[in-house]
């Protein structure tokens, strides 16, 4: 009761993903170099989309045919579009908005990598465990994320069992 709440009132709720709704897709690196990278989130500071764009710009140096799909909307969209233009990658970055479930499932299935570099913005709003990370992992997507908020509870550094 150190923090003012009796232990019997605490409970841990784990986030579950209905695996039948997110079928596993066996993926291989694209032989033609046409990598499809994605992120699915609201376009707000804690989701780290600006960091994703900077990382994608570096990735494109060695993978010139790569494309980045950002599924979501939010107040940062215009700023992120300007950043992508400034990085010289705007033609290969696709802001596809919020997608209906079927379209989002297709994007998961057709992608090779999922990015989610959450960060702590000035208002200190932290991420829990993002459902999109769990959904991506359920489909077999490789997830590159930060050690932030609840993400380390879902992702083991280095991957594998």
Image (spheres, rainbow, N blue to C red):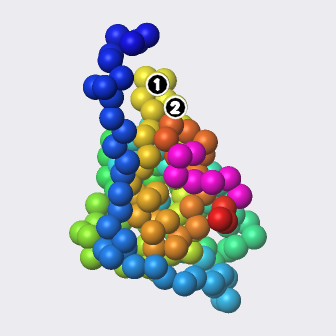
Residue 112 shown left or right of residue 138 in the figure = right
Tell me the CA gap for discs 2 and 1.
Answer: 5 Å
Rendered residue at 57%/45% (across/down): 152
Which residue sits at x=33%, y=16%?
5
In reply to whether residue 157 is colored magenta, the answer given is yes
Residue 87 appears in the rendering = no
Residue lying farthest to the bottom in this orientation: 31
Residue to which mark 2 is pinned: 120
| In magenta stretch: residue 114 | no
Q: Is residue 47 above or below residue 104?
A: above
Taking 110 as reference, is 44 above or below it?
Answer: above
Bin the neighbour count of mark 2 within 10 Å (Cα to Cα): few under 14, some 14-19, many 20 and up: some
Magenta region: 152-158
Residue 70 lies in quadrant: bottom left
- Determine which of the numbered discs, if any, sits on residue 124 in the image: 1
Quadrant location of the C terminus in the rendered image: bottom right
Q: Is residue 158 visible?
A: yes
Q: Residue at x 57, y 61 (%)?
A: 143
Q: Is residue 122 above or below residue 31?
A: above
């Amino acid at each position: 009761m150190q923090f003012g709440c009796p232990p019997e009132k605490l409970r841990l709720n784990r986030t579950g993903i209905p695996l039948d709704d997110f079928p596993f897709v066996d993926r291989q690196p694209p032989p033609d170099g046409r990598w499809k990278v994605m992120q699915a989130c609201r376009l707000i500071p804690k989701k780290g989309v600006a960091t994703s764009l900077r990382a994608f710009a570096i990735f494109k140096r060695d993978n010139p045919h790569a494309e980045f799909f950002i599924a979501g909307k939010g107040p940062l969209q215009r700023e992120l579009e300007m950043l992508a233009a400034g990085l010289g990658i705007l033609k290969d970055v696709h802001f596809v908005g919020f997608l209906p479930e079927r379209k989002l499932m297709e994007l998961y299935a057709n992608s090779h990598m999922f990015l989610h570099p959450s960060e702590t913005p000035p208002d200190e709003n932290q991420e829990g465990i993002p459902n999109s990370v769990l959904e991506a992992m359920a489909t077999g997507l490789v997830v590159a994320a930060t050690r932030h908020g609840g993400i380390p509870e879902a992702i083991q550094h280095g991957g594998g069992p």
